[in-house]
Amino acid sequence: MLFAVQMDIDLPVEMDPAVKADTLAREKAYSQELQQAGEWVHIWRCVGRYSNLSIFDVADNDRLHEILWNLPLFPYMTIEVTPLARHPSDIALLD
Ligand SMILES: O=C(O)CC1=CCC(=O)O1
């Protein structure tokens, strides 16, 4: 199942720099592990914002929830999930 997920990040200005660096490093490692596994298909920066737009290909809603819930940055995120379906004009459907 494909999902578009927008993650808006809002880190507290008073966050300890060492905690911030550790959280960001863990976020990057977690994301890259899921990208290697093929579940986190795309990650794009939203221009001009501390946000990303990502595409996930996961087994079901529960798996996406598990992935998002375990993001190290989850406590500092506002997340919007859009389930995706094939568009009838997609030329990939001609294959
Ligand atoms: O968009 C960000 O910077 C937050 C994030 C999610 C996965 C990652 O590596 O960074």
Image (cartoon, rainbow, N blue to C red):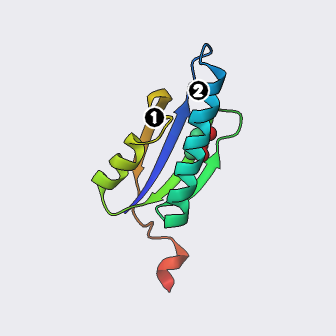
Dot 1 lies on which element? helix
Q: Position of residue 74 (x, y in %)?
A: 45, 34
Q: Position of residue 62 (x, y in %)?
A: 28, 52
The numbered mark at residue 82 is: none
How far apart are the alpha carbons under marks 1 and 2?
Answer: 14 Å
Q: Position of residue 6 (x, y in %)?
A: 51, 42
View extreme (top): residue: 14
Label 1, on which residue? 74
Label 2, on which residue? 19
Which of the two residues, 91 or 18, is positioned nearer the viewer here? Answer: 18
- Residue 52 shows in this picture: no
- Against 94, residue 9 (above or below) is above
Which numbered mark, 1 or 2, is in the foreground of this view?
Answer: 2
Residue 58 position by quadrant: bottom left
Q: Which residue type carries mark 2? A: Val
For ligand 1, tell me if the residue under mark 1 lies within 8 Å: no
Relative side of 8 to 60, left or right: right
**What residue is at 59 percent from the left and 52 percent from the top?**
43
**What residue is at 49 percent from the left and 31 percent from the top?**
77
Quarter of the figure with the N terminus = bottom left
Crowd band around label 2 with a 10 angstrom C-alpha radius: few (<14), some (14–19), many (20+)? few
**What residue is at 52 percent from the left and 78 percent from the top?**
92
**What residue is at 61 percent from the left and 13 percent from the top?**
14
Which of the two residues, 16 or 56, is positioned nearer the viewer here? Answer: 16
Query: Do the residues bearing badges 1 and 2 touch, measured as CB atoms within 8 Å?
Result: no
